[in-house]
Image (cartoon, rainbow, N blue to C red):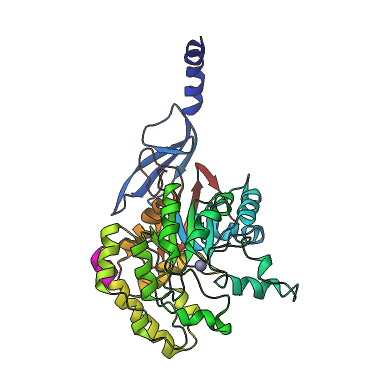
Amino acid sequence: MGLAFSLAMAPATVALAHEGIEFHNGQWFDGEGFSSGTRYVVDGVITQARPAQVTRREDLEGRWVVPAFAEAHNHNLQNAWGARRSREMYLRDGVFYAAMMCGDSDSNQAVRDTLAGQDAPHVVFTACISSSDGHPLGMALRSYRETDPEIGADAIHDRSYVVMDTPTDVETKWHLVQAARPDLVKAILVHSEDGSRRGDPELYGVNGLTPDVLPVLVQRAHADGLRVAAHTESAADFAVAVAAGVDIVAHLPGYNFWPGKDASDYRIDDATIAAAAERGVVVIPTASIAEASAKDRERLAAIQAMQLDNLSRLKAAGVPMAMGSDRFTATSIVEYDYLLGTGLFSRGELLRMLSVDTPRLLLPDEAVGCVDEGCVASFVVLDTNPLAVDDAIHAVVTRVISGRMIEIE
Ligand SMILES: [Zn+2]
């Protein structure tokens, strides 16, 4: 009876589904190049088959259609205030997927509530894990003390991030990770090889997990089907992360040099790079933050030489990379510009990273990062050819998000 009923209902449903928007005279990106043609958007999905009813026809006038961009490392949409402030910036830039790399249970829920029912980037949520004296404690204390000078670490521990000081904390605190309903687990390492940092009051709040915690954490996360992204700062952190089995490294080591450290502390060794390539660990370089954090031009030059050394060997080894900026006032677009400026990547390689590889990294179970048959209809139209013009990705003229054309003032 139930089956007969649903069969009888099917034609009405199908008729509705055959109504769509036509985009003709476009050039569509396939991850390598462009080919001209017409696509339709029906029920939020791209199809090449003309639906029975076309409700709107858009002439793309030969412009370039690429999958919506993604941001793999940021904090702009990590709380309700940030989500209100930055939502439109993401839409304007065409960045429709964004991973917020230090989430917690309350903030994640507040962001879900804030963005519900509006056109907004798809936020990839995390649960952030560090040590009791670790980053982001120092940052959080500084900001909380602007309004309450007496506030202590207790207000931040297991609230703004989950504290795991020993391997046994992983199991006992795991419910706090689950409470954040994360898409990814974020683990913080900051010169984890240097035990002398722990006793230094100057470094209270800017440390991270000890190396023995990470493999236990990765195992626990994987048992729940969650991937782990590691914040690394030193070459040793990178090696600890790869050996622990993390899925993603969220910073290229050496985006800044800590006091008393030099280039040798940040150069990733070839064996570790080979291991990262073999395991398919994805690296998010966030290289452009060097510009924002280096204290002078001489230091910046040293950092950039280090970045070129690490990036060129990672690339040569075939380590996959994703686009992330970690910039408070910007999106992954600035990372594209910065990486293009290194001369290590072609425009095509970077466009693929921004619009194909990074969306797929963030949403591995969805048909994103493509503008072909069956793909999610989230794409942007560019005014100039991004394979020929450096700043073409800045000229977004049309935005379609989950099948809806959106207008931005
Ligand atoms: Zn970050």
Q: Residue 393: image x %, image y %?
A: 42, 62
Q: Residue at x 63, y 46 (%)?
A: 116
Viewer-nearest residue: 332 or 247: 247
Q: Residue 24: image x %, image y %?
A: 40, 42
- The image shows residue 332, relative to residue 32, as above or below, that is below
Q: Residue at x 38, y 38 (%)?
A: 374
Visible residue check, residue 95: no
Viewer-nearest residue: 207 or 71: 207
Task: Give the main secondary structure, helix, strand or loop, of the magenta stretch.
Answer: helix
> Quarter-wise, where is residue 257 in the image?
bottom left
Viewer-nearest residue: 279 or 27: 279
Residue 317 within the magenta-colored segment of the rendering: yes
- The image shows residue 66, relative to residue 40, as above or below, that is below
- The image shows residue 320, relative to residue 290, as above or below, that is above
Visible residue check, residue 302: yes
Residue 168 is left or right of residue 254, and the answer is right
- The residue range painted magenta reads 313-318
Q: Residue 251: image x %, image y %?
A: 42, 69
Q: Residue 30: image x %, image y %?
A: 31, 49
- The quadrant of the rendering that contains the C terminus is bottom right
Direction top: furthest residue: 1
Q: Residue at x 58, y 48 (%)?
A: 119
Residue 166 is left or right of residue 141, and the answer is left
